[in-house]
């Protein structure tokens, strides 16, 4: 009886010994909060889908992704981030989809000393790089970079006066500020400004005011499918000027919802949107096509979204940073590792991703330049690369 008990204990001890190294070998945890529901769902869903394509092992470390939905609500985004850091002990957070939530998360990132990589566009998420924003990074192009491209295109179109209708939140206000500066720098006057909310179902009053100002062009500053509302209203009311959108409209769902009303509109976008149309020497073409092929192999032809590309790029930044953070000797799951990961992300150099080439620094936590933008026109319901408007 004693011999059997001894054998049983020996087997148990051997099994425990085999599991101890695995238990001691902490895995990297990546928290993700996205707007899979709510007004920004058309952006958040492809972002969520992209998580399943990210690597689950980097530099010999297992990587776990914990994904939450914040319903396009900044309060929930902040709550999710606190949960991911406090309850799940993540090493880095990706998110969130919309600018208001991302801006609200920055203070939590600093408070908990957890690096975050936003997939929202507003420059105020990362600028200026001081205080809490030393812990915040982002992968979408800054509004300023895209506003400059729009202003240059407007000059080529002969636009002298511009109307503006944008979200009544951080995204819209950020774009109003950047577009006004870029337009004035090119001698273009903003003659009318209107705002609307993401969930609105009518913008008739705003559109009538815009049209009464008779601008040569109108910019819609929104993101996801809600941008179709003012676009369609203006077209249906007979507006004959040139329609512009921001890169927030670079989404196939926008074309589906907007239909023929989106024809002939112009927008700056990440190279991913027209990857096949880019010249072969474009530095991000192959990376963009790699992501596109992987995404469409899983989710179907034509399902690719530039917003999913922003999350893919966040994954690439983290993949490049983890080995450098591990070289410091810090262990995943510790404050020291989060600090080392933050430092490694900040030192990202010459990383060709799906939307541009990242060169981060202590003064630049977006890290993109003109290679991260192309001008696009909708022709017969399709995105068409416009190299002459670059």
Image (spheres, rainbow, N blue to C red):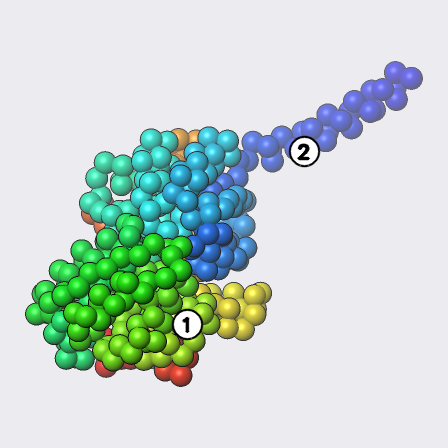
Q: Is residue 148 left or right of residue 76?
A: left
The residue lying toward the viewer, choosing from 131 and 40, is: 40
Q: Tell me what residue is drawn at x 56 percent, y 65 percent.
A: 299
The residue lying toward the viewer, choosing from 371 and 14, is: 371
The residue lying toward the viewer, choosing from 162 and 115, is: 162
Q: CA distance from mark 2 to mark 1?
A: 58 Å
Q: Tell me what residue is drawn at x 62 percent, y 30 percent.
A: 20
Q: Pointer 2 and pointer 1: residues touching (CB < 8 Å)?
A: no
Residue 344 image point, x, y percent = 34, 45
Q: Is residue 293 left or right of residue 177?
A: right
Image quadrant holding the N terminus, namely top right
Residue 252 image point, x, y percent = 44, 70
Residue 121 image point, x, y percent = 31, 55
> Which mark identifies residue 258?
1
Image quadrant holding the C terminus, namely bottom left
| Badge 2 or badge 1: first in the primary sequence | 2
Instruction: Check the image and report above or below for 355 versus 54.
Output: below
The residue lying toward the viewer, choosing from 332 and 221, is: 221
Q: Is residue 339 left or right of residue 59?
A: left
Q: Which residue is mark 2?
A: 18
Q: Is residue 364 visible?
A: yes
Instruction: Check the image and report above or below for 304 versus 240.
Output: above
The secondary element bearing badge 1 is classed as helix
Q: Quadrant of residue 241?
A: bottom left
Residue 296 image point, x, y percent = 53, 69
Mark 2 is surrounded, within 10 Å at the Cα level, by few (under 14), some (14 to 19) or many (20 or more) other residues, namely: few
Q: Tell me what residue is drawn at x 36 percent, y 62 percent.
A: 202
């Amino acid at each position: 009886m004693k011999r059997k008990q001894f054998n049983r204990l020996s087997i148990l001890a051997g099994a425990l010994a085999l599991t101890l190294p695995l238990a001691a070998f902490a895995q990297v945890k990546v928290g993700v909060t996205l707007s899979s529901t709510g007004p920004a769902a058309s952006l958040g869903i492809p972002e969520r889908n992209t998580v399943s394509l990210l690597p689950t092992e980097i530099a010999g470390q297992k990587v776990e992704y914990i994904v939450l939905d914040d319903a396009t609500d900044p309060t929930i985004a902040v709550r999710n981030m606190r949960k991911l850091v406090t309850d799940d002990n993540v090493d880095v957070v990706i998110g969130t989809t919309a600018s208001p939530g991302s801006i609200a998360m920055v203070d939590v990132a600093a408070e908990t000393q957890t690096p975050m990589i936003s997939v929202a566009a507003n420059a105020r998420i990362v600028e200026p790089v001081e205080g809490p924003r030393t812990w915040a990074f982002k992968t979408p192009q800054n509004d300023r970079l895209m506003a400059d491209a729009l202003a240059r295109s407007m000059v080529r179109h002969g636009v002298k006066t511009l109307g503006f209708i944008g979200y009544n939140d951080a995204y819209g206000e950020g774009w109003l500020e950047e577009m006004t500066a870029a337009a004035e720098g090119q001698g273009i006057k903003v003659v009318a400004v209107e705002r609307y909310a993401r969930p609105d179902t009518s913008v008739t009053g705003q559109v009538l005011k815009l049209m009464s100002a008779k601008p040569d062009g109108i910019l819609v500053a929104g993101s996801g499918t809600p941008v179709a509302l003012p676009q369609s209203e203006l077209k249906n009311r007979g507006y004959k000027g040139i329609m512009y959108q921001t890169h927030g409209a670079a989404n196939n769902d926008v074309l589906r919802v907007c239909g023929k009303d989106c024809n002939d509109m112009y927008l700056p976008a990440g190279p991913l949107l027209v990857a096949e149309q880019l010249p072969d020497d474009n530095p991000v073409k192959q990376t963009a096509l790699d992501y596109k092929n992987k995404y469409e192999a899983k989710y179907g032809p034509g399902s690719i979204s530039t917003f999913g590309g922003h999350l893919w790029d966040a994954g690439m930044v983290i993949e490049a940073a983890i080995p450098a953070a591990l070289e410091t000797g810090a262990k995943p799951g510790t404050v020291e590792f989060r600090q080392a990961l933050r430092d490694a992300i900040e030192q990202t150099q010459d990383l060709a991703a799906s939307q541009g080439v990242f060169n981060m620094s202590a003064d630049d936590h977006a890290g993109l330049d003109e290679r991260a933008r192309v001008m696009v026109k909708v022709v017969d319901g399709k995105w068409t690369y416009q190299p002459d408007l670059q």
